Image: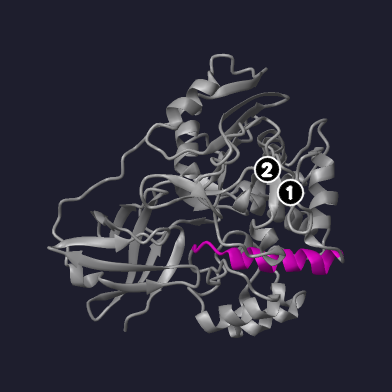
């Protein structure tokens, strides 16, 4: 059972502990902490344990990995540097980071705006590399997923580039820039990075599915080291401190009214830069560092952390929900929490019963981060789960747009560039993948 830690929110009718209990139904849950913050008041609730092997309960002091929620902090720092005149949003990044030329001719067109909004065309990667140069070399060999500015394709690599840009322009490490420019201003004491600092015993242990309906201790995502810190590899914090950080990044101000970002750049950060391909289910578009959710208030923004974390911010109300977990279905769990607290609809994905030609889509599609196999079983299109390998049905929406339920996430699956009767690209799990079987 979940237990409330504090109860001072102005949203007095919200039983956050009860919401966590209900959100856990149907999911493999290890532990979670949720903070509901509105203005200067907050409610925090927890459920489960740090580690299923010893059953130590989660508390409001438990540290969780933020994963890609960290990208919002990287984005704020880049926009601060824009405000200081050190780089223009639409200026080629290669002017400040000559190493980017390793990607080829397209590097000349890549801007900070494109990197922040995942439209730079850089293929996604999430694995250990010995150096930034080695990562760029791998990206060059993988080739672009599109022309710069053409389309949305989520790229951790792009945020590694932004981290390197921060270090080049500030003359300090990315971690030091985060501490001096964001953490100190917001006043978050728990936030830490690993490596090099060892995590305390109050940090949540990651868990993964053993394939037999149970969770076991294991890495939530492959370790990548400090290089991928700006993309989300190294940062930990409590749920309450995460909510405070997200509120500051979403409103452009810290408690007391001090400015984190000039109003003009703050508004630009919240402005949708590009719509997602196909018929998106969760995010309708992306801004500078934020996902734009399909439902919610006009200026609401969200971000995910792998499949284990979700934050939702409504800057108009000064409201944040930070959902941090230590299990792979945390994103789905978090969506349940957000819907219950904010009263958002749970729209089921559309299903079309129109006949489709399986040969138009079957084949292997690949990105540096993962691959997906599309095949037909007695006329039913099936896809492999890139997170676990099991096959699931591909449900038709309309045209070349489908969706699939991978368990850890439900994702749109949209096909592009049909040539000789076969699609050449697929957009799934927020990434663009290239056909690899021709």
Give the Cα distance between marks 2 and 1.
6 Å
| Quadrant of res 424 | bottom left
The x and y percentages for residue 20 are 50, 28
Q: Residue at x 65, y 28 (%)?
A: 37
Who is closer to the viewer here, 240 or 266?
240
Is 159 part of what is drawn in magenta? yes
Looking at the image, which residue sits at the far front? Answer: 54
Is residue 172 among the parts visible in the rendering? yes
Where's the C terminus, which quadrant?
Answer: bottom left
The x and y percentages for residue 198 are 76, 52
Secondary structure predominantly adopted by residues drawn in magenta: helix
Q: Which residue is mark 2?
A: 203
Who is closer to the viewer here, 148 or 185?
185
Q: Which residue is mark 1?
A: 199
The x and y percentages for residue 97 are 75, 75
Q: Give the magenta-colored segment's residue range.
A: 152-170
Q: Is 405 situated left or right of 302 in this image?
A: left
Q: Residue at x 49, y 52 (%)?
A: 285
* SS assignment at label 2: loop
Is 324 placed above or below 9 here?
below
Number of on-image labels: 2
Disc 2 vs disc 1: Cβ atoms closer than 8 Å?
A: yes
Instruction: Please tell me how crowded label 2 is: few (under 14), some (14-19), or many (20+) other residues with Cα within 10 Å.
Output: some
Q: Is 328 situated left or right of 127 in this image?
A: left
């Amino acid at each position: 059972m979940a237990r409330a830690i504090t109860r001072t929110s102005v949203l007095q009718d919200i039983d956050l502990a009860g919401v966590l209990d209900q959100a856990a139904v149907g999911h493999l849950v290890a532990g979670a902490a949720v903070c509901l913050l509105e203005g200067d008041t907050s409610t925090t609730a927890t459920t489960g344990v740090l580690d299923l092997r010893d059953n130590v309960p989660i508390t409001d002091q438990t540290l969780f990995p933020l994963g890609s929620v960290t990208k919002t902090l990287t984005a704020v720092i880049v926009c601060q540097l824009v405000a200081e005149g050190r780089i223009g949003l639409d200026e080629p990044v290669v002017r400040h980071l000559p190493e980017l030329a390793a990607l080829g001719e397209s590097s000349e067109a890549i801007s900070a705006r494109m990197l922040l909004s995942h439209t730079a065309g850089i293929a996604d990667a999430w694995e250990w590399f010995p150096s930034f140069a080695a990562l760029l070399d791998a990206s060059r060999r993988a080739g672009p997923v599109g022309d710069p500015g053409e389309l949305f394709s989520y790229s951790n690599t792009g945020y590694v580039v932004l981290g390197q840009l921060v270090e080049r322009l500030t003359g300090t490490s990315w971690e030091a820039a985060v501490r001096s420019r964001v953490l100190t201003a917001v006043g978050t004491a728990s936030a830490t990075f690993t490596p090099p600092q060892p995590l305390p015993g109050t940090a949540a242990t990651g868990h993964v599915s053993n394939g037999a309906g149970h969770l076991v201790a294991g890495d939530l995502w492959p370790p990548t080291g400090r290089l991928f810190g700006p993309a989300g590899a190294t940062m930990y914090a409590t749920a309450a401190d995460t909510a405070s950080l997200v509120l500051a990044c979403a409103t452009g101000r810290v408690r007391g009214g001090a400015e984190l970002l000039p109003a003009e750049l703050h508004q630009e950060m919240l402005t949708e830069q590009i719509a997602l391909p196909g018929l998106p289910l969760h995010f309708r578009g992306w801004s500078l560092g934020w996902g734009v959710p399909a439902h919610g208030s006009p200026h609401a923004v969200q971000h995910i952390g792998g499949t284990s974390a979700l934050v939702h911010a409504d800057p108009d109300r000064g409201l944040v929900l930070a959902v941090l977990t230590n299990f792979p279905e945390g994103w789905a769990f978090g969506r349940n929490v957000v819907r219950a607290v904010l009263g958002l609809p749970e729209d089921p994905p559309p299903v079309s019963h129109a006949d489709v030609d399986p040969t138009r889509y079957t084949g292997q599609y690949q990105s540096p981060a993962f691959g997906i196999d599309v095949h037909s079983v007695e006329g039913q299109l099936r896809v492999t789960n890139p997170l676990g390998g099991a096959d699931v049905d591909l449900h038709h929406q309309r045209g070349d747009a489908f969706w699939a339920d991978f368990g850890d996430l439900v994702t749109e699956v949209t096909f592009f560039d049909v040539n000789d009767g076969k699609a050449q690209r697929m957009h799934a799990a927020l990434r663009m993948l290239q056909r690899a079987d021709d």
